[in-house]
Amino acid sequence: MKLHHAATSPYVRKVMACAIARGIAGRIETVPANPYASSPELLADNPLSKVPALVTDDGVAVYDSPVICEYLDTLGDAAPLFPPTGSAARLAAQVMHAAADGILDAALTRRMNMPHPQDDARRAVDVRQKAAVDRALDVLEKAPPQGLSDIGAIAVGCALGYLDFRFAHEPWRETRPALAAWFAAVSELPPLAQTVPVG
């Protein structure tokens, strides 16, 4: 398999964390990609010019990260990260997954906004997106993930890691001790320990 990859993308990290958890990371060839450059190679596999984009062994292009993660969950022999369809556990994991991706969407909007002049409109966008992140973190504090055994937990771990990576000047742990304790414990596990962003 081939994965269009950017080392600082939290969505790429989520995919690679899932691959490590499933024991199939060695089957994936990572190909560096800059989604903002829209290279012909990336566009051939994802017309949206976004990473991650996976090409299966059968040559099928798969995107974006939730779809790739669910596909990877069909491979390997480790315990599945997606609970059975129709189960309460699956619904809970997917809702947590959506909360984590929402944190990432908001954080990335803020990150993309940073280099631009901060007029009133941009400041309003930043305030709104930061509030969304804070509300989601507050919900997760009330019911943190358990371990790192499903897609919701992996996604939350990647989201918190991205906040530390890009927004270290905005501490989140002090008012969320349960979430902080969970993150400290799971950060030592291979899916997160082996995918820490650099750059």
Image: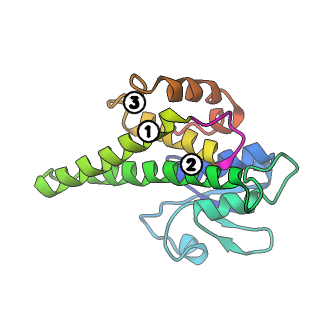
Q: Which residue is mark 2?
A: 96
Q: Amino acid type of disc 3?
A: Trp
Residue closest to the eye, 98 or 123: 98
Q: Earlier in the sequence, mark 1 or mark 2?
A: 2
Cβ atoms under marks 1 and 2 closer than 8 Å: no
Q: Find numbered disc 1 in the image and state the secondary structure of the residue it sits on.
A: helix
How far apart are the alpha carbons under marks 1 and 2?
A: 11 Å
- Residue interval drawn in magenta: 144-151
Q: Which residue is mark 3?
A: 172
Residue 89 seen in this snapshot: yes
Cβ atoms under marks 2 and 3 closer than 8 Å: no
Looking at the image, the residue that sits furthest to the right is 77
Looking at the image, the residue that sits furthest to the left is 120
Q: Position of residue 84 (x, y in %)?
A: 77, 57
Looking at the image, the residue that sits furthest to the front is 88
Q: Find numbered disc 3 in the image and state the secondary structure of the residue it sits on.
A: loop
Residue at image point 63% right, 24% down: 185
Cβ atoms under marks 3 and 1 closer than 8 Å: yes
Q: Is residue 5 left or right of residue 136?
A: right
Residue 199 seen in this snapshot: no
